[in-house]
């Protein structure tokens, strides 16, 4: 999914950011230097964080960070509570005021909400999920690029968050939401990288089966309502509607609507692909999967459908790996399945290839995939055709056994072509926890990257190291920690040379004998936008 970015240079830049226009030139102009697009720092970024949990035994931390180097000296980066609308029945918000807009008061007439978090200085960020006012205090507010800030809450009423960063805070603004659920369905570690709003999302790996409660959270950051459709595809194609149709769900302004997926199917479906599309407006979308026995996590959107998919960061101690693939459209896809491991690419025994029928979800269990070696799954067209069908994919990874299982999801991820950022890495892991680990994969050709630890949220200074990746491999990397750092810190990964790099970060925390963990993909952090060079004077368009 693409961040909402506003770059430099007025209308031409805005068109480049929104429509992907790479060239503004006179017809027939063949000068390559005139048509090449320059990359400029973005000036504004919007992010949304889903509602963390409704559990009474959940604790959530939000961590925000922007790397240094953005343009200008003035700016801000704040996340405010969003209203909660809809009842999760599949009907969503009614658009009749169920979620108040930015100008409304809450039911007590206050300008502040209840139950939010506290920032690193102990200042309250209010929020009860019933309204987000223009004058409400931010839950998370950054003060200095290069230094993470955190906020915490243990409220079951903690809201979804919406916000923007501008000026020097916009390029690469990254926010992580990490929740520990200590008991009940979905107990374990739930991690989500707060995401940019968009109009289309694919989620392979969801479920409406007994024992699972999967909610898709739809969050609207704008001041006008969005209308959203949610479609589910199983192994036989599009699923028949259940109690809720999933069509025409209204998400009121600056509000969040949770939709229980099991209400959208006439019968339980074990492996399902969810497609979220906005008819009007735009939303952020993520799925929270909660299993009665195997824990749970957030399912992030898969990368845009492509003929090839890379899923980075399958842990070496995975006890089971289920691959879920969907081919949008009517064309079947025949795929080669490879694991880029620490020593090279291997073919999973018995799963060398995979046939995916168009418009249908295919799932396969890859038993004993990693063999004690962390790796990344690489799915590519069997015939290397340039016109191969496009796919989206995700894996459900399980660690532990029996009643001590925990689950996380790794979707297909976009390559890191410039810089990626991930936050909420502990400088001093608590007992029973492990430091954050990076999975850096070069599935095609070798590459070199720089890994930098920021200052900690409680102080310290940055540290960097350079990592060389061999072709067709994945390297498990323990990133450096800030010198003298305290609290949590951010990690940036910059590609210096070589081929494309795919990356993810794993956080692990033992929880009453359960190997709780969560994995976040690391695509580019949206620090720049392509700005076309104008090879033609367009001022004549303004002549009357």
Image (spheres, helix red, strand yellow):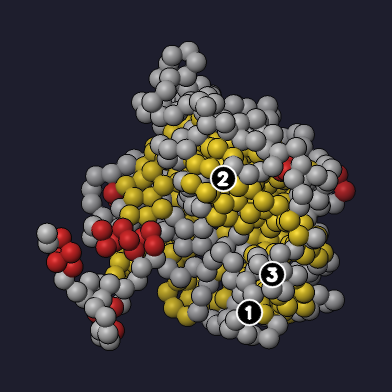
Residue 263 or residue 77, whichever sits in front: 263
Q: Distance between the residues labelled 1 and 3?
A: 12 Å
Q: Residue 330 bears which disc, if any? A: 3
Q: In the rendered image, which residue does mark 2 sit on? A: 228
Secondary-structure class at tag 1:
loop
**Nearest to viewer (mark 2 / mark 1):** 2
Q: Please tell me the numbered disc located at residue 388.
A: 1
In the rendering, at what x and y percent does residue 534 appear? 22, 71
Q: Distance between the residues labelled 2 and 1?
A: 29 Å
The residue nearer to you, when weighing 244 against 124, is 244
Instruction: Give neighbour class at mark 3: few <14, some 14-19, many 20+ (Cα, 10 Å).
Output: few
Residue 123's x, y, as percent?
A: 42, 26
**Picture quadrant of residue 386:** bottom right
Asked whether residue 28 is in view, the answer is yes
Residue located at (53% from left, 60% from top): 522
Q: Which element carries disc 2, helix, strand or loop?
A: strand
Q: Is residue 47 left or right of residue 268?
A: left
Nearer-N-terminus badge (2/3): 2
Please name the residue shown 40% across and 36% down the image. 223
Q: In this view, does 375 lie above or below 189?
A: below
What is the quadrant of residue 15 in the picture?
Answer: bottom left
Look at the picture and state if 253 lies above or below 434: above
Query: In the figure, 524 relative to 352: above or below?
Result: above
């Amino acid at each position: 999914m693409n961040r909402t970015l506003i770059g430099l240079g007025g209308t031409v830049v805005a068109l480049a950011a929104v429509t992907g226009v790479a060239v503004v030139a006179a017809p027939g102009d063949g000068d390559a230097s005139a048509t090449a697009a320059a990359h400029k720092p973005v000036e504004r970024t919007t992010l949304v964080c889903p509602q963390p949990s409704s559990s009474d035994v959940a604790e959530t931390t939000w961590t925000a960070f922007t790397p240094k180097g953005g343009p200008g000296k003035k700016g801000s980066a704040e996340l405010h509570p969003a209203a909660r609308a809809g009842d999760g029945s599949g009907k969503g918000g009614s658009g009749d005021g169920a979620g108040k807009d930015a100008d409304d008061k809450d039911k007590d007439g206050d300008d502040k909400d209840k139950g939010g978090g506290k920032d690193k200085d102990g200042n309250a960020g209010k929020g009860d999920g019933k309204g987000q006012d223009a004058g409400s205090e931010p839950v998370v507010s950054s003060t200095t690029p290069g230094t993470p800030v955190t906020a915490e809450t243990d409220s079951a009423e903690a809201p979804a968050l919406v916000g923007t960063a501008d000026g020097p805070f916009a390029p690469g603004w990254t926010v992580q939401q990490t929740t520990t659920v200590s008991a009940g369905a979905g107990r374990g570690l739930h991690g989500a990288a707060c995401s940019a709003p968009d109009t289309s999302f694919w989620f392979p790996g969801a479920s409406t089966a007994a024992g699972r409660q999967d909610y898709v959270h739809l969050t609207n950051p704008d001041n006008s309502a969005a209308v959203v459709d949610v479609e589910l595809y199983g192994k036989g194609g599009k699923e028949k509607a259940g109690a809720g149709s999933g069509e025409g769900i209204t998400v009121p302004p600056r509000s969040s609507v949770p939709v229980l997926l099991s209400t959208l199917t006439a019968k339980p479906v074990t492996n399902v692909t969810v497609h979220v599309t906005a008819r009007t407006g735009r939303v952020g979308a993520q799925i929270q999967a909660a299993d009665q026995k195997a824990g749970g996590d957030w399912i992030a959107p898969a990368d845009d459908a492509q003929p090839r998919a890379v899923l980075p960061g399958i842990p070496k101690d995975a006890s089971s790996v289920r691959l879920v693939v969907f081919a949008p459209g009517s064309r079947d896809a025949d795929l080669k399945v490879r694991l880029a491991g620490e020593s090279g690419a291997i073919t999973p025994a018995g799963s060398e290839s995979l046939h995916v029928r168009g418009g249908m979800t295919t799932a396969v269990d890859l038993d004993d995939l990693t063999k004690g070696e962390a790796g990344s799954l690489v799915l590519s067209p069997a015939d290397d055709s340039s016109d191969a069908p496009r796919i989206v994919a995700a894996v459900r990874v399980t660690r532990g056994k029996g009643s001590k299982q925990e689950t996380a999801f790794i979707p297909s991820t976009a390559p890191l072509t410039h810089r990626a950022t991930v936050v909420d890495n502990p400088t001093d892991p608590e007992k029973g926890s492990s430091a954050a680990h990076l999975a850096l994969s070069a599935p095609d050709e070798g590459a070199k990257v720089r890994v930098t630890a920021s200052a900690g949220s409680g102080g310290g200074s940055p540290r960097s190291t350079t990592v060389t990746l061999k072709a067709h491999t994945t390297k498990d990397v323990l990133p450096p920690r800030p010198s003298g750092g305290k609290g949590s810190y951010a990690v940036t990964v910059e590609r210096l040379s070589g081929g494309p790099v795919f990356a993810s970060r794993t956080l692990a925390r033992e929880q009453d004998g359960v190997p709780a963990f969560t994995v976040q993909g690391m695509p580019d952090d949206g620090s720049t936008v392509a700005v076309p060079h104008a090879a033609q004077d367009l001022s004549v368009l303004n002549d009357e």
